Image (spheres, rainbow, N blue to C red):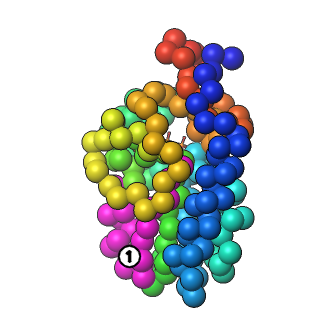
Amino acid sequence: MPVIPLISQEEIQQKVQELGQKITQDYQGKELDVVGVLKGCFLFMADLIRHIQLPLTCDFIRVSSYGDQKVSSGVVRFDFDVTQPITNKHVLLVEDIIDTGLTINYLLQNFQTRNPASLKVCSLLHKPENTRKKVQIDYLGFTIPNKFVIGYGLDFAGKYRNLPYVGILEEDAEP
Ligand code: PRP
């Protein structure tokens, strides 16, 4: 498989534990509504919430902008929404990666109009070199170079999400 390992399973698990502990401290005495951005978030969020020692609910939204391509189309498509209102809730949006920032910027604007009690962002990965919309990432796992990454929930044309680590897909790889 033409994948160059970038972040090991052990490094991910260590970081996820740290993020969970930090979130637990920051939200003491509060209830959290953890909202994952599908599909890429599903492994990270499953691991993260097991390190958050707070009463919490989980919900999911589905947006996409890449299709089967390696480069963002620039158009965020809203496929489905949360199942419960977020009004007056402490909402934590969970992303696998913030790349151009277009997706999370769109979601923050959209969610803010629904008047949550608070709204923060947790992302496993950030690719700052590719930023088109700058957003504050409240909880960040790793800053990565401007390479196409896959694994631990991240895909190329739907595949590779099941890798337990994050790797760089070689330039000429086919889906
Ligand atoms: C990925 C990722 C983020 C978004 C980040 O989703 O999960 O939601 O792209 O990119 P951006 O910062 O450039 O907007 P994708 O559209 O690939 O859908 P998926 O999560 O279902 O793979």
Question: Could you tell me how many numbered marks the image carries?
Answer: 1
Span colored in magenta: 105-124
Q: Which residue is at 33% across, 35% downward?
A: 129
Q: Name the spot of residue 63 as percent of width and height, x first.
A: 47, 50
Q: Which residue is at 37% across, 79% downward?
A: 115
Side of 41 where 81 appears, left or right: left
Q: Which residue is at 31% across, 41% downward?
A: 131
User: Quarter-wise, where is residue 107 in the image?
Assistant: bottom left
Q: Name the spot of residue 14 as percent of width and height, x first.
A: 67, 51
User: Is 79 contained in the magenta span?
Assistant: no
Q: Name the spot of residue 135 as percent of width and height, x first.
A: 32, 55
Residue in the foreground of this view, choosing between 168 and 56: 168
Quarter containing the N terminus: top right
48 up-or-down from 148: above or below: below
Side of 84 where 71 appears, left or right: left
Mark 1 crowdedness (10 Å alpha carbons): few <14, some 14-19, many ≥20: few
Quarter containing the C terminus: top right
Residue in the foreground of this view, choosing between 97 and 156: 97
Q: Name the spot of residue 97 as percent of width and height, x first.
A: 49, 45
Task: Give the labeled residue for mark 1.
Answer: 114
8 up-or-down from 88: above or below: above
- Label 1 is placed on what type of residue? Arg
Question: Is residue 52 visible from the viewing direction of this image?
Answer: yes
Q: Which residue is at 62% across, 64% downward?
A: 20
Side of 70 where 84 appears, left or right: right
Question: Is residue 42 visible from the viewing direction of this image?
Answer: no
In the picture as drawn, the residue positioned furthest to the bottom comes out as: 29
Q: The residue tagged with tag 1: helix, strand or loop? A: loop
6 up-or-down from 45: above or below: above
Q: Does mark 1 have its CB less than 8 Å from ligand 1?
A: no
